[in-house]
Image: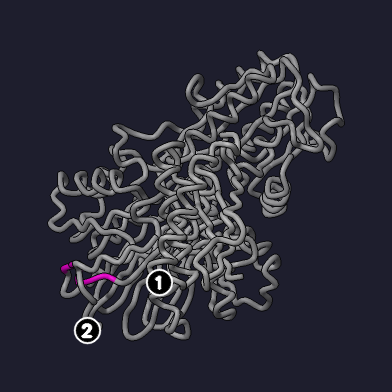
Amino acid sequence: MSHMHTELGTPPALGTNTLRVIPLGGLGEIGRNMTVFEFGGKLLVVDCGVLFPEEHHPGVDLILPDFGPIRDRLDDVVAVVLTHGHEDHIGGVPYLLRERGNIPVVGSKLTLALVEPKLREHRLRDVPQHVVAENDVLNLGPFELEFVAVNHSIPDALAVAVKTPAGVALHTGDFKMDQLPLDGRITDLRAFARLGEAGVDLFLTDSTNADVPGFTVAERNITPAIDAVFASSRQRIIVASFASHVHRVQQVLDAAAKHGRKVAYVGRSMVRNMQIARDLGYLHVPDGVVVDKIDAAPPEKMVLMSTGSQGEPMAALSRIANRSHQQVSLEPGDTVLLASSLIPGNENAVYRVIDGLTKLGARVVHKGNALVHVSGHASAGELLYCYNIVKPSNVLPVHGEIRHLHANGALATQTGVPNVLLAEDGYVIDLVDGHASIVGAVECGYVYVDGSSVGEITDSELKDRRILRDEGFISVVVVVDSTNGKIVSGPEIQARGLAEDPSVFDEVTPRIVDAIEQSLRDGTHDTKQLQQVVRRVLGSFAGRKLRRRPMIIPIVLEA
């Protein structure tokens, strides 16, 4: 999918005292977040995440930001700064580093620890890494970076203030304002206020929950709901969550210890991430609670901590639901707890998993019927607080679908922000003399990871896949003798993915013969043109008779 925005035109050359901002992902979708800052001929990248494919992306494994606008300038990139360790912010890092392997990667201790296995998987060695924490200041080229603690659904999240002679941009990353976080680490509003007093020229704010009134519920508030699930369950409990949601896993471990249960991790990413979190001190495991085997205790004493809360086809929970998991089989009376909210676009996949689990006899507890998850993103009330504290000159809503960006922009306007920019991926924003404006756009599309290929599959090829999946396939082979204008063999018609009996094509076969022989009599001997004749006749028949638009592959050979 290309986001060309030709109506905006090509951006001008960068001015001498201008801070340029180019979002290459995350504006118009929940995922593949990536923003490029440019000043003085140098580039700074903030986040580089992935977007997970939906049903209209058959066969696609991941979707990346488009590196095209900076591909010929990778030597100018001074660093990739990562705000936190979620896949939609770090998953694309190894793909960027495959194009230039010595770009420094900057992030908190946990964030970089979650990136490290990805680098090993892609055989990326000796990547420069800089561990930072809140209140740290780091100078990279013409950029001075100050890091601010923010609260999110993963520990060690950071906002970053990007300071240049052209002005200061404050990027929140993903955040909320939980006043009673499980780890005691709150969003540092004092730092926000201090930066605001000094002057924030451009405020890039998380928009995901901008259309949700009030304040996001505190993580602690769901502990009683989780405890109630454990107290009422008489058999095995399976909890599904993001593999990076350390806080949620901590709550499950604490509940298991309270109710005398053992916990086993299911899913490679869950095992890896929780080991990292434990080693670094972000996850506190009660003695004797975590076990290596899923049958280490009787079912009524076991909890399985699983991946797959978004209905991902290859994740553990989906395979459990469709009985394809090699180790875990669901028994009637088991309880499944979906400890996550729905990412937009995943609803159908999640509900299919819930239906599959219910059909197998499980009790499924999810956000729709119990308070078992809270969002990691600031709601409208929290965003209003931030705007009133920071008092920015310009606001650029980021991280969200179009409705979220517009809702966030409306909040900023209500608080008196003088200039609110509603942009999309590929827009080019220049900050000059304290005023930000959209000055053009660059070509910016989806980059698909498809097996071992990256960026090779096109939207037209995806369309072909959708046709094959939804409409079926018909091949036609005809052999002609161009000298006498007759058909020597065929038409032989083969169909796949169609419910109709093959005899249905008996009606169209003589029409194909008549059309080809007429074309031969009219002097058309080019096989490609004859193939188009076959495609038209058969396509018209399929649309009218079968009410389908299958992929048609005609083959015309000369005898």
- Kind of residue at disc 2: Gly
Q: Count residues near mark 2 (Cα–Cα under 10 Å), then give few for <14, some for 14-19, many for 20+.
A: some
Please name whichever residue, 2 or 39, is drawn nearer the observer in this view of the structure: 2
For the image, the number of numbered tags is 2
Q: Residue at x 56, y 72 (%)?
A: 130
- Secondary element at tag 1: loop
What is the x, y in percent for residue 254? 67, 31
Drawn side of residue 540 relative to residue 495, left or right: left
Looking at marks 2 and 1 on the same chain, the residue that comes earlier in the sequence is marked by: 2
Asked which colour scheme the image uses, the reply is one colour
Please provide percent x and percent y for residue 316.
69, 39
* Residue beneath the point at 30% across and 32% down: 214
- Name the residue rendered at 56%, 39% in the picture: 498
Q: Is residue 417 visible?
A: yes
Specify whether residue 436 is painted magenta.
Answer: yes
Question: Which residue was labeled with disc 2?
Answer: 15
- Position of 15 with respect to 480 (left or right) is left
